[in-house]
Image (cartoon, grey):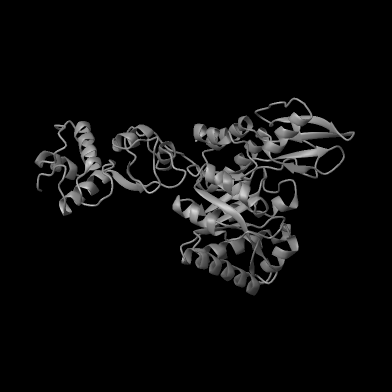
Amino acid sequence: MTTLRRGARGTEVRELQRLLQEWGYNPGPIDGIFGARTEQAILQFQRNHGLTSDGIVGPITWQVLQSQQPGYQMYTIQAGDTSYKIALRFQISLSSLLAMNPGVDPNRLNIGQRIRVPSPGPGAEPGLTRIVSGWLPYWVQSLAFQSVQNHPEIFRTISPFWYLMTSSGDVLNLPNAEDRTILSYATARGISVIPLITNSFDSELISTILNDPVLRQRHIQNIISKLVQMNYPGIDINYENLFVRDRELFVVFVQELKAALSAVSKQLIVSVHAKTDPTGVWSGAEAHDYIGIGQAADAVRVMGYDFHWQGSDPGSIAPANWVEEVLDYAVSTIPRNKIELGVPAYGYDWPQGQTATGVTYANAVATSNQYNVPITLNAQLGPHYTYTADSINHEVWFVDALYFGTLLNLVNKYDIRGICIWYLGAEDPKIYDIINAKF
């Protein structure tokens, strides 16, 4: 290659600028003009590589510039990226990322900028060791999506509530379904969108489909068509409150659906009610056969919450000792690498003698401040407090980062696939620090 210096022009200068950019230096526009910015980039490159720092690209500088650097890939900076987030996403240490890009200011990343990302190797700090997923309810979709945007490096999968089954086997769109902003954002950041389809807790609805082989196949084909049309990687089947008599038929449905999905290279996730033994404490839980479902599905999301629910007496959403019993039973029936624990992020406010209202972490904290009542922290049961409004006593139980961390400890103890958060937008913002710490 020709020796180049400031003032040179042509295709070799363009190649020089391209190489500098790949190394993580900023030579300015790739325009074939060796100007001041290209010279500064060369000077910095030479200093960083122990070369004579003269700004002249001679044979030795060319040789180093053109040397192969195995074990890296090029990455384009996206909106919201930081060096820390990129390191987490690619499961590498921050120090190795910075070392691979000596000409890049980590505090001034620009959208569209190209940097080198080293492959994880010996001594690299691990990224998240478990899958983190999150459910996005359609009725708070914007709020839930904000959580994803705030922490894109955390989520492997998101499951928005987008579809509803019908008694004729159709797949209907729920409000806010197929949001293009969510789809494009997730695709750009390598987050899988595996939408959820629900039966709206309707026992009769799902029973109609399960008990008619023709309708069952029609429903399966409609699910397949939707996944292929939208290019989703899979589906989350959230069919709850089944009749116990439909227990075996639901397994047949899951098996048939999995076979059809495999034919088009799609994944099957099934969400199931939590229980500590084969029957559980109510019919919906009994109707979910963990063994049959676990054998057929690619992943099973065990909804480890609502131990106390809206219609029950006040109490912990997911007592840690109960969650441990749930996991103890789950791993005895479902392969560990298929289990995601559905972890709560919400709370309930029970007016005395009445049905509870759901609350977010922010709601719960704001109410305690409004009525000037202390919050009792409890790592095993969750934070809680009482207050009085309009002469009615209220009891509030919710989830904070401390309590959330206890549940993640159980995930690690039982060495399962990961978690799915119910629901995004309701959480204590500090749970993401806990996820990084625990996983």
- Closer to the camera in the image, 349 or 31: 31
Position of 28 compared to 435: left or right? Answer: left
Residue 15 in percent (x, y) is at: 19, 50
| Number of marks in picture | 0
- Closer to the camera in the image, 85 or 109: 109
Position of 245 compared to 253: left or right? Answer: right
Kindly tell me whether residue 297 is visible in this rendering: no
Q: Is residue 279 above or below residue 427?
A: below
- Closer to the camera in the image, 321 or 114: 114
Residue 358 in percent (x, y) is at: 74, 43
Position of 416 compared to 169: left or right? Answer: left
The residue under the point 53% across, 36% down is 435
| Residue furthest out toward the bottom | 214
Position of 408 compared to 385: left or right? Answer: left
The residue under the point 24% across, 49% down is 18
Residue 180 lies in quadrant: bottom right
Residue 51 in percent (x, y) is at: 15, 32
Residue 257 lies in quadrant: bottom right
| Residue furthest out toward the right | 391
Kindly tell me whether residue 406 is visible in this rendering: yes
The residue under the point 80% across, 45% down is 311
- Closer to the camera in the image, 389 or 218: 389
Residue 267 in percent (x, y) is at: 50, 58
Q: Is residue 296 above or below residue 332?
A: below
